[in-house]
Image: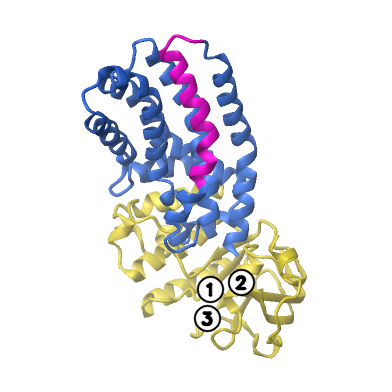
Amino acid sequence: MIALLLRDLKLAFRAGGGFGLGLAFFLIVTVMVPFSVGPQSALLSTIAPGVLWLGALLACLLSLDRLLALDWEDGSLDLLATAPLPLEAVVTIKALAHWITTGLPLVLAAPVLGVLLNLPVAGFSWLVVSLLVGTPALSVIGTFGAALTVGLKRGGLLLSLLVLPLYVPTLIFGAEAARRGAVGMDTGTPMLMLAGITAATVALLPFASAAVLRVNLR
Amino acid sequence: MTLTVTDLSIARGGIPVLQGLGFDLRPGTALVVRGPNGIGKTTLLRTLAGLQPPLSGHITGAEDTIAYAGHSDGIKPTLTVTENLTFWASVFGTAEIRPALEAFELNDLATRHAGNLSAGQKRRLGLSRLLVTGRPIWVLDEPTVSLDVSAVAMFATAVRAHLSQGGCALIATHIDLGLDAAVLDVGPFRAKPRPVTDFDGDFL
């Protein structure tokens, strides 16, 4: 399992691996919001938590179609399915590798980009905490979507259509936790809901992903 | 470990392709699968490897014993030859990749990125993966595609060495490997084309 994680991380950092792609997308989206909204710092600080969460979510989506498709194309997925590793472990490791190369950099970059959107000082810590708790769910749900669409030509677009609705609960509670933190309100309820969503998806979805992958490999 | 197949029926895309197939594969023996294009050789090998369920029939002795090599080699172009092999070795829980590199004369290419290899060299790397799996039953689908004459000889030597160590091999190929192998012609087992009736149950 460690070997698979290390290989996926190595592939992400090598040429064409796509590391930093999501991060650059996140940066560009965040920079463009003030251009489109105009120089209204009060409005920007109101919408900052929501915009940052939406940007992080879309950046996460960007690298999902490569998650399993590349392994499918070169036959690695067939070989992994016949290896001693259970497919449930394979998809969990794949989701973890996706989170390390996409989710974690987004979490770390979010405070810097918060400055660009005039995020209130009180909101920085809650933004980081909510993203840290919420992004693993994005990776795990995304892996499920990737497993559903693996082997389809032009599956990337379908993947987005399938996965975005599934991201809604995470987005609602994540952005709400960050917003409440920014205006100094109690963040307990949305944070608990967000943590609950992440815990449930991490616990259950790998089994669903492995099951659809078995069907798709036939 | 003997692989036993009894009264096996398999389907591709919901259409039965082979039915009533049965054979034994004993340690130290090889079986060459022959048959015209589209008869279901690949489907048979994928079924044995556990990548798809059979329609009916029994396969015994296939659990965690099969090393499968299909049409694609499962090679990552941005990893080196050594990194590719080391990865598969650790997935299968074996440590030594040197014999595999030597068997397919990949030592000189060990530090090259797999993306820079020729088609035949990639194929040799894909086949050398079999040696690091440590599994007794090799199930190979057209293993000699894009190999030159000397590489085919390398492959035949590797298969012979594997058989002499008590392994066995099931090979779908159209060329003569010079192996002392029985031939399984799947042509007579062709299924009558009819749609599978309980598609939904099978799908789920």
Membership of A159 in magenta stretch: no
Taking B123 as reference, is A207 above or below it? above
Magenta region: which residues? A163-185
In the figure, what tint was chain A given?
blue
Q: Amino acid at mark 3?
A: Thr
Between residues A212 and B191, which one lies in front from this camera angle?
Answer: A212
B141 lies left or right of A112: right
Percent position of residue B166, x then y: 64, 65
Q: Amino acid at mark 1?
A: Asp
How many other residues sit within 10 Å of disc 3, few (<14), some (14-19) or many (≥20)?
some
Q: Which residue is most to the bottom?
A: B188
- Which chain letter goes with mark 3? B
Going from the N terminus, do you reach mark 3 or mark 1 first?
1
In the structure shown, which secondary structural element does the residue marked by tag 3 occupy? loop
User: Are discs 3 and 2 located on one and the same chain?
Assistant: yes
Q: To which residue does mark 1 refer?
A: B141
Question: Which residue is label 3 attached to?
Answer: B173
Residue occupying the point 40% across, 33% down:
A54
Instruction: Residue at 33% x, 47% y: name it.
Output: A17
The chain letter under disc 2 is B
Badge 1 vs badge 2, beta-carbon distance below 8 Å:
yes
Q: Give the colour chain B carries in the figure.
A: yellow
